[in-house]
Image (cartoon, helix red, strand yellow):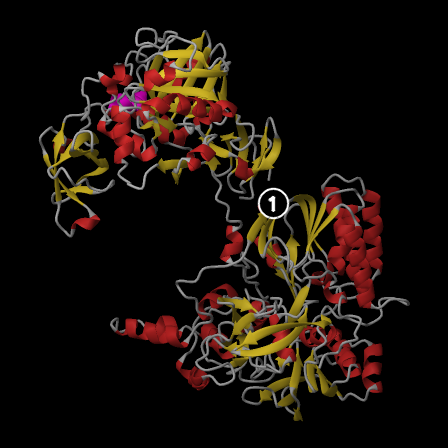
Amino acid sequence: MRLERLPTLRVNPSEQCTVNYHGKSYQGVAGDTVATALYANGVRVFGRSLKYHRPRGLYSLDGECSNTCMAVDGIPNVRAENTLAKNGMRVAAQNVIGSADFDWMGFMDKADWLMPAGFYYRTLHKPARLWPLALRQVRKAAGLGKISPDFKMKGRFSEIYPTADVCVIGGGPAGMSAALAAAESNLRVILLEARPWLGGCFDYRVSAFDAEKKLFERGRELAARVEAAANIRVFKHAPNVGIYNNNLVTAFQIGPPDGAYDERYIEIRATSVVVATGCIERPLLFENNERPGVMQVGCAHRLARTYGVMPGRRAVFSIGHDMGLEAAIDLCDLGMEIACVADIRDDGQAPDLLMALAERRIPFLKGWVAARTHGAKQVKKVTLRSIEGSVKRQFECDLLVASAGFTPLTGALTMAQARLRYDAHTGYFMPTQLPAKMHVAGTMTGRNHPLSIEASGRLAGLRAAADCGADNADAVTVADTHLGRLPGPERGTKLVTAPVKGRKSFICFDEDTTVKNIKQAIDMGFDVPELIKRFTSAGTGPGQGGIPGHNLPLFTARYQALSGATPLPTVARAPLVPTLVATYAGAHHDMCKRTPLDELQKRDGGVFRRIGVWQRARYFSEDLSCREEVLNVRNNVGMLDGSTLGKFRLHGPDALKALQRVYVGNMAKMSPGKIKYSAMCNEDGCVIDDGVVVKLSENEYYFTTSTARAGETAEWFRYHTRYDGWDYHIVNLTDGLGVVNISGPNARKVLQKVVDADISNEAFPFGGYREFTVQGAIPVRAMRLGFVGELSYELHAPAACMVSLWEILTEAGKEFGIRNFGVEAQNVLRMEKCHIILGVESEQRTNLLDLGLGFLWDRHKTDTKTVGTVALRQAEGDPNHFRLVGIEMENPERAPRDGSIIVDRRIRGYVCTARRSFSLNRAVGMALVEAESAGVGTRLEIFEDECDGRRLAARVVPMPFYDPPGNRMRM
Amino acid sequence: MALTISCPVCGKRNGYEFRYGGEDKGPRPDEKGLTPRTWCDYAHMNACVAGVQKEWWCHKNGCGVWFTIHRNTLTNLEVDGPEVTS
């Protein structure tokens, strides 16, 4: 039974939407939240509370507490009030055994005397053996949502990093006015709004804004202007979750139903920020103040006006501000029976509202307040008392609208390090010192008159524009004067609790903290709200202090009754509203690079693996030992895609100096047409990269780095020469050039068929560098290297030519039976030669000398200040280092897994790479071991996960294992 | 994460784009007569100023240049010069 014709509705009653709650279907309408859809169908109890399993219902409609946290589609702790209902959603109540209505744990409510403030810390630790038992029981009985360890988050997540001149937080009338004012100066403005629409406190109200318009019409008019402004970017349904120094504002946004994302993270860099987050209501504290059927003014009013759901049949109001009177009058006009309106205030009500109450014959009590609700699962009766507690009256009702006053939402301000001070006139925490380029506006400044709200927004917007350099000093003065003529901040109510003891008056709903608990904490000596918050856990739940944030400091100051004690605020921290970790994590992209030969390698049956940033073909056979691939290279000829190799051009008058700085070898001793193998160390002498360098001409060099270092090499060069002001340039050609490695005894025969140069062993010997063309068209830089230990050519060619080059070589090699080999086969081949891969045969502590690469280091090169050489000199002869050794397994059929540890009574080292070698019919590998175990002949015991507690035996042997004289790569 | 840095080539950019290169400690010392102690001080020891310090940054996701800025380590904001201004 919806109110279908209201002009303020934000739902579409003609479009149905079904959610499933505990196995039953509930009809909502398009635009409903989960909570309003259930409420419209008569659901009043939405879940049970953390400790006492008290029934909880709809209270704020803005997700300020955990009352309506539910499990939705398997995700726990979803705030049903903020989550749009979607067809087919599965919803379940939390912390219940049975159902929300009939919870077998309901008796816990009677056990509150067993659980005073801090009982968890104080009672359950002695004796210690009781603790595990208590832990299990507590975990079973308390808590909110549950999540399965196997749960996998579904959904599409995204992220966005916009920049703005002015960022306005809050899309109410003040925020919209601020955005429009700032946009006048042609600045880029971002407006964040938590609800799915703009309008804030104007959106659902039908009181007059001026002679022609009602408030909601004015709200929609402003919204239309904001949406039409080209330089205002509006993020709706995007609550602000954090604000950091330098005006970095974060938010998360819920995507539209058929949008490209479900939720996304927004990180805004703004020059100036306007905070216009408005107010929430300050809960009224009385006995059973969270019984289902008790709700805040805005909640009841918006249920009817925004969602078309009548919140109840017969209501009692216990309020402390004019918005409460306004809501009572409007709900009466919509057909609700109002049993009584009790106002905390003795005076100060707007005369026209009092007149309207009288016209409708609504009983009105000044200086009265709700003291207790009756009814086990839902409000049936309310006891009202006069403020001093002497007189009481009772009313039958099914709805109690209760609100003590307003609370400004200052989370964004405190996060930005603004200092807040209690303001006695409004009763608010107001900023005294705002950070640079931050402004506040709207109801959070205590202004409630619609014109004042807009004027304060306009002024803040103009000031923010001035921060960004707008020349608008005159406009600021005019706006300031205008605001000064309008009604200022209103007096706020000071009442904190009804005249009750407070055993069941809940100051924090999320953590089941009562007024009595707070008194206990204060009596135990916790004297400031921050400490009480931690001891009683009030305000640490999913509502992020929304319910107790204001009442806790007020109550603490009142209870202590110290002269001059002013309430002290507690600090809010990010996230200001509960956010999914998945939203923070953002988009799930597998960002990787593919080589120019990717398609061809796939066609040839390559099995790809992620290696660093690259996708590379690791195997070309089902047999993961790659026997055929390996033997084909040893006996015939194979081809490997080596395009991931880092490739660089270095040129300029000081290029040699730069090389000398980072490479340990003497790079001055290079002759054209020959390659030089060298290594780079870090300041500790530990090897970070190895590769070859070619001198192309005077002041021009070409060099390669390992795949992993390709990204950082340019940065490394520039970092280590940053003080020198040298004239050189480094160009990363890694993606611009591809590499084919053609290896095996028949490699020359294949290559000779397609090149225009003499590549005989005499003309192009081992260690040589040549430039020629393939089939007269493809320019190739060729190096004769021996990484796999056979006759081998590394051909570097422009990425665009790589497919052609590969096809040409494949065609030329057909008669020899050329075939691909993958990264794993290369790994076996080079391991047999004991050629290292950094990061596999080394770790962070491994220096050049440990690897037996000391011959690369030119000790006489002292004036070049080469990186790492000072440390190398100091590390020479240091016995406390792992050494790289060759090992051979005693069982020739069985190689240990890479990374297995070498042990006797303690760990002596670990295996780097070990494989069954088909070329040698032995199981061999390389290992890093302590110096005392590094002697040839030493027996090593290897522990591996799979070996059932038995150890594998190996012996240290000389390196390399295959072709020790190196004849085969020189053929 | 709230830090923004002014790259001399690209202008003021998001701090995510940069790599920190440590305090400004001056050029590499001469290797002649260098004791392990003085070398260790140069390579590994930092002043850890609580206030404004001069430090190196690399615009790694941009133009790739290394440059120095002054940063107030107490506020984590870039400042114009070596004096504490805010």
Q: Is residue A908 left or right of residue A340?
A: left
> How many numbered badges does the structure rendering display?
1
From this view, report whether residue A740 is shown above or below residue A294.
above
Q: Amino acid at mark 1?
A: Tyr
Q: Is residue A856 visible?
A: yes
Check disc 1 and report the residue beneath it.
A161
Q: Secondary structure at mark 1?
A: loop
**Observer-nearest of B6 and A788:** A788
Task: Quadrant for the N terminus of chain A, please.
Answer: bottom right
**Observer-nearest of A239 and A357:** A239
**Observer-nearest of A388 and B26:** B26
Q: Specify the subunit that label 1 lies on.
A: A
Q: Find residue A657 and report its horizontal and vertical position in percent.
A: 42, 13
Span shown in magenta: A867-874
From this view, report whether residue A181 is shown above or below residue A773.
below
From this view, report whether residue A764 is shown above or below residue A546.
above
Q: Find residue A824 and report its horizontal and vertical position in percent.
A: 31, 35
Task: Quadrant for the C terminus of chain A, please.
Answer: top left
**Occupied quadrant, residue A782:** top left
Specify whether residue A870 is painted magenta.
Answer: yes
Q: Is residue A5 left or right of residue A297?
A: right
**Observer-nearest of A658 and A488:** A658
The kind of secondary structure the magenta stretch mainly shows is helix
From this view, report whether residue B74 is shown above or below residue A331.
above
Q: Find residue A67 and report its horizontal and vertical position in percent.
A: 55, 74
Q: Residues within 10 Å of mark 1 (few under 14, many from 20)?
A: few
Q: Is residue A721 left or right of residue A568?
A: left
Specify whether residue A760 is painted magenta.
Answer: no
**Occupied quadrant, residue A908:** top left
Q: Find residue A415 and report its horizontal and vertical position in percent.
A: 57, 54
Q: Is residue A721 visible?
A: no
